[in-house]
Amino acid sequence: MSVSGAIAEIVAERWIERTLASYPAEAHALLCGETDPFRNPAGHAIKQSLTTLAHELLGEMEESAIATALDALVRLRAVQDFRPSDALRFIFDLRDVVVEVIGAPPQALEIRIDEMALMAFDQYMACRDQIAGLREKELRLRMQCAAK
């Protein structure tokens, strides 16, 4: 399934808008307003990742490109103050964006979105496990220091 790059760009722009709207007002202003990737690494990662994902979803669906883009975005959202369902909602919002841009999505596109959601869920859980492991390690170190 390959659509024009212009359609993928429109999907990406609208998807970015929806995803950024999920942030509180103060964070939203920073994520949208600052274009310098060094001053706004989170906003840059969101925009870059969603653009890549939109192009891959509507294009060749190169698994390594998707995994890299998802990893950057999911890692970011895993450490932010989101419930798991809200952290991954951006993928399901893609369905609405696609409907707005191209109308009813073909079955093949629905399957691709589902595959992307499953990949994101696996990555999210791996990130949360890693965070839990780091917290546990930090707690053990604190306990060791307190015992001395």
Image: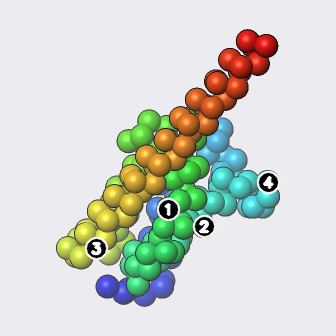
The answer to which of marks 4 and 2 sits earlier in the sequence is 4
The answer to which of marks 4 and 1 sits earlier in the sequence is 4
Eye-nearest disc, 2 or 1: 1
Which corner quadrant of the image does residue 95 belong to?
Answer: bottom left
Total residue callouts: 4
Side of 121 relative to 108 (left or right): right
Element assignment for label 1? helix
Q: Mark 4 — residue?
A: 39
Mark 3 neighbour class, 10 Å CA radius: few under 14, some 14 to 19, many 20 or more:
some
Name the residue type under label 3: Leu
Element assignment for label 4? loop
Q: CA distance from mark 1 to mark 3?
A: 17 Å
Q: Mark 1 — residue?
A: 70
Q: CA distance from mark 4 to mark 3?
A: 35 Å
The answer to which of marks 2 and 1 sits earlier in the sequence is 2
- Residue 48: image tag: 2
Q: CA distance from mark 4 to mark 1?
A: 22 Å
Residue at 39% x, 74% y is 57
Vertical arrangement, residue 82 with respect to residue 115, above or below: above
Residue at 79% x, 13% y is 148
Tag 1 near tag 3, CB within 8 Å: no
Q: Mark 3 — residue?
A: 109
Mark 2 neighbour class, 10 Å CA radius: few under 14, some 14 to 19, many 20 or more:
some
Name the residue type under label 4: Arg
Can residue 24 be seen from the camera position used here? no
The answer to which of marks 2 and 3 sits earlier in the sequence is 2
Vertical arrangement, residue 118 with respect to residue 3, above or below: above
Tag 4 near tag 2, CB within 8 Å: no
Percent position of residue 127, x then y: 52, 47
